Image (spheres, rainbow, N blue to C red):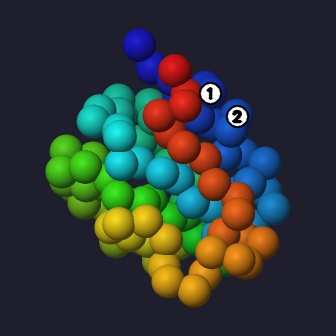
Amino acid sequence: MSNAVELEGAITPLVRAGGEVRLECAALSFMDSTSFNVLLRAATRLRDQGTLVLLSPGPFIHQVLGALGLAQMPSVEIREGGSRPGSERSTADRRRTDLTQLR
């Protein structure tokens, strides 16, 4: 069952605000095509005003991001092991959605 509606509802206000939108993906083992499409739309909207940061996606998620071209988009950054050192205090970094909470 897809949680794409919940995902889009959670990240849309963050995308509108711009800046860095961080999504914690470490515990995520599967996403359907509808959810990947939500990420694609978010990355497209952020193109000139921010970055969609995917934190620690597992092997399957990482592979699909690459296959779909999301990993190569200028507005998408994939980080392993959490946030970039020294960036934890910025306002933009505090906007974060844990994808595993969207159940």
Q: Are marks 1 and 2 in contact (CB under 8 Å)?
A: yes
Percent x, y of residue 72: 34, 71
Percent x, y of residue 27: 35, 40
* Mark 1 Cα shell of 10 Å, populated few (<14), some (14-19), many (≥20): some
Percent x, y of residue 102: 55, 28
- For the residues labelled 1 and 2, the Cα–Cα distance comes to 5 Å
Q: Up-down: is 34 above or below 14? A: above
Percent x, y of residue 16: 79, 57
Q: Residue at x 19, y 45 (%)?
A: 60
Residue indicated by mark 1: 6
- The image quadrant that residue 46 belongs to is bottom right
Q: Is residue 100 visible?
A: yes
Q: Residue at x 62, y 27 (%)?
A: 6
Q: Residue at x 54, y 43 (%)?
A: 98
Q: Up-down: is 14 above or below 93? A: above
Amino acid type of the residue that numbered disc 1 sits on in the rendered structure = Glu
Residue indicated by mark 2: 9
* Mark 2 Cα shell of 10 Å, populated few (<14), some (14-19), many (≥20): few
Amino acid type of the residue that numbered disc 2 sits on in the rendered structure = Gly
Q: Up-down: is 34 above or below 47? A: above
In front here: 72 or 29? 29
Secondary structure, mark 1, is helix
Secondary structure, mark 2, is helix
- The image quadrant that residue 67 belongs to is bottom left
In front here: 37 or 30? 30
- Judge left or right: residue 82 versus residue 32: right
- Judge left or right: residue 49 versus residue 31: right
Q: Up-down: is 1 above or below 48? A: above
